[in-house]
Amino acid sequence: MFKRTENFKEYTTLYPVVSTLLALNIIIYLTRFIPMLGDEVFRLGVHANFAIADGEYWRLFTSMFLHADFLHLLMNMFWLFLFGPELELLMGKLRFITIFLGAGLVGNLASFFLYEPNFLSVGASGAIFGIMGAYAALIYYTRKMMPELRQLILPLILVSVVMTFIQPNINIAAHLGGLAGGFLIGLIYLHPKRVNRWRTRL
């Protein structure tokens, strides 16, 4: 299910939203190597609780597209590359981007309300956990029909949650908030009555 065998052209054609998010994150990361510009992009986009409290609410979104270093970017983009396509196909472009941004927003709001004013954070992790949360919602609705999906996804979610508490310098609130946000949005989008309405339009 999550084996990616497409070539570059096939991947970008089949999964335009995931491809755009991957490209956007990579391009924004590369700006850090442009003198002055990179520092300014980071300064204006980082999740800073004191700045958000002063009304700079855009940081709740822009921080999803900034990463601390190459390894941070690589890990998040690997998960998006691997698990995003199937959800985009299932949900459609608009619903998928809603899950990504909505879950990321929930994670960042959790960080804002739970951490101290000088707390700083960057990364797409909350949104990535939101994708996993949406899969958890799919498991909830298909638990009797697709047990193999549960066997595949639940261990990944459990390991990811455990690693959240083990690894240093992790925004726990963003991870768990994003997971919860993705699950709740997924419950709405994947409700059997709603899915049946999608099918009648196809």
Image: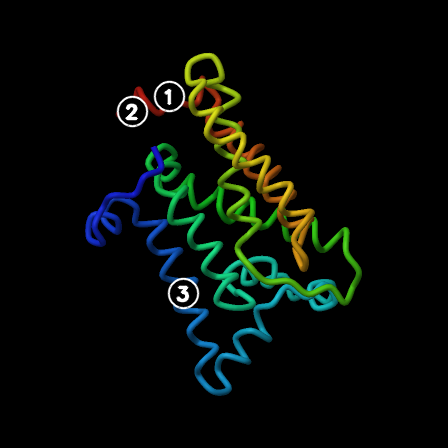
Q: Which of 166 and 93 is in front in this view?
A: 166
Q: Residue furthest top?
A: 144
Q: Nearer the viewer, residue 10 or 184?
A: 10
Mark 3 / mark 2, whichever is N-terminal: 3
Q: Nearer the viewer, residue 57 or 159?
A: 159
Q: Which of marks 1 and 3 is in front?
A: 3
The residue pinned by badge 3 equals: 26
Q: Which residue lies furthest to the right in this view?
A: 116
Q: Which of 150 and 138 is in front in this view?
A: 150
Q: Please state, as top left, top right, bottom left or bottom right, where the C terminus lies in the image.
A: top left
For the residues labelled 3 and 2, the Cα–Cα distance comes to: 36 Å
Residue 15: assigned label: none
The residue pinned by badge 2 equals: 201
| Residue depicted at x 60% and y 67% | 46
For the residues labelled 2 and 1, the Cα–Cα distance comes to: 7 Å
Q: Position of residue 159 (x, y in %)?
A: 58, 39
Instruction: Classify mark 1: residues with Cα within 10 Å, few (<14), some (14-19) or many (20+).
Output: few
Q: Position of residue 122 (x, y in %)?
A: 59, 62
Q: Is residue 71 above or below residue 175?
A: below
| Residue depicted at x 48% and y 24% | 150
Q: Where is residue 162 in the image (x, y as percent from the top left)?
A: 64, 41
| Residue depicted at x 66% and y 54% | 171
Tell me the amino acid under the disc marked 2: Arg
Tell me the amino acid under the disc marked 1: Arg
Q: Please state, as top left, top right, bottom left or bottom right, where the N terminus lies in the image.
A: top left
Q: In this view, does 158 lie above or below 115?
A: above
Cβ–Cβ under 8 Å for marks 2 and 1: yes
Residue 197: assigned label: 1
Tell me the amino acid under the disc marked 3: Ile
